[in-house]
Image (tube, rainbow, N blue to C red):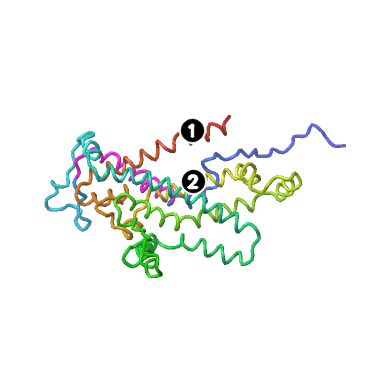
Amino acid sequence: MTDLTAERPDYAVTRPRPKILRNLSSKFAALPMVFVALVVFVGCTLWSFIYSFTNAVALPPAIHLFPPDFSQYMAHFVGLREYYQLFAQDKWNVSVHNIFAYGFFALLGEFVIGFLLAVFIDQKIRFEDGFRTVFLYPFALSGIVTGLVWEWMLNPAFGLEKSMHDIGWTSFSFDWIANRDMVIYSVAIAGIWQGSGLVMALMLAGLRGIDDDIWKASRVDGIPKWRTYLFIVIPMMRPVFITSLVLVAANIVRTFDIVVAMTGGGPGYQSFLPANFVYDKLASNLGEALAASASMMMIVVVIVAPWAFYEFGRKRT
């Protein structure tokens, strides 16, 4: 007869490991990325913001850790003086005006053209892979190549205007690239040509994610296709539009090489963008260049913050 009162063996109770000790191999693998993010991005951003309140002229030469005359590289706190001087310059004010004009037309053009191209390819056309490659190819080109190509095409001496004159249309005029008031729009044309392919690829992925039952239901109800796109499909693609907006806006803010290759900032400085201004000032007035970059960052924060509060606040609700 079994003794029920016999002592039962003790089993060790395993306690869950603290969260900080879980998946240690993955965390160690992510350390280099975390280090780069903290030091390069966060650290350099804070350093640039702090030094924008100083009268720093230039960085010490890279080949000398301690240059012989280090005093010329010393920086002293001057408050908002660099910002006052920055916004008193016509070149900076022109570049700020240009980034808003360029950003508006580039954003609008890339979204409209990219979405229409995605709708076109989504119709199950023949040679879809070929068309998709052709439309996406400009995005694979560097900004320097894009700027040089469009500088040649828009140059009145041997580009589109001369070609129209050669075929007999002598009254045709398209000299935006040499016009002080229109040059930034010629840069926007090049930016739209380069960026529309990326928007097309993202929009096409979003369209391919739409359930076929929605199209069948709209056909049964007799809804025109354009109304289906406008009132049903586009609202369903909201995450794709937000992703595209973030990527396109980031490309617009850092636009630099297209301007350098296409116009060199001219005529005069009428096609300067903030990134070109910062690069132009880095060698002569570091404090002012950092004030310009900090102003760019604050402009982005002012634009993005309301959307971020709305987006994440709506999700919490």
Residue beneath the point at 45% across and 48% down: 107
Q: Name the residue nearer the viewer: 39 or 153.
A: 153
36 vs 301: above or below: below
Residue beneath the point at 49% across and 55% down: 196
Q: Is residue 221 magenta?
A: no
Q: Using the image, tell me which numbered label, if any, was put on residue 196.
A: none
For disc 1, the marked residue is 309
150 vs 17: above or below: below
Please tell me whether the stretch drawn in magenta is mainly helix, strand or loop. helix
Distance, label 1 to label 2, CA atoms, is 16 Å
Q: Name the residue nearer the viewer: 276 or 33.
A: 276
**Horizontal placement of 278 versus 138: left or right?**
left
Furthest residue in direction top, as rendered: 317
**Count of numbered marks:** 2
Q: Is residue 35 magenta?
A: yes
Q: Specify which label sits upstream in the sequence, 1 or 2.
A: 2
Question: Could you tell me which secondary element the residue under label 2 belongs to?
Answer: helix
Q: Position of residue 252 (x, y in %)?
A: 40, 49
**Horizontal placement of 221 versus 95: left or right?**
right
Q: Nearer the viewer, mark 1 or mark 2?
A: 2
Q: Position of residue 255 (x, y in %)?
A: 37, 52
Q: Amino acid at mark 1?
A: Phe
Q: Name the residue nearer the viewer: 134 or 167.
A: 167
For disc 2, the marked residue is 245
Furthest residue in direction right, as rendered: 1
Q: Give the crowd class for mark 1: few <14, some 14-19, many >=20 residues within 10 Å.
A: few
- Image quadrant holding the N terminus, namely top right
Q: Amino acid at mark 2?
A: Leu
Q: Position of residue 101 (x, y in %)?
A: 38, 45
Magenta part of the chain: 33-56
Q: Position of residue 266 (x, y in %)?
A: 27, 55
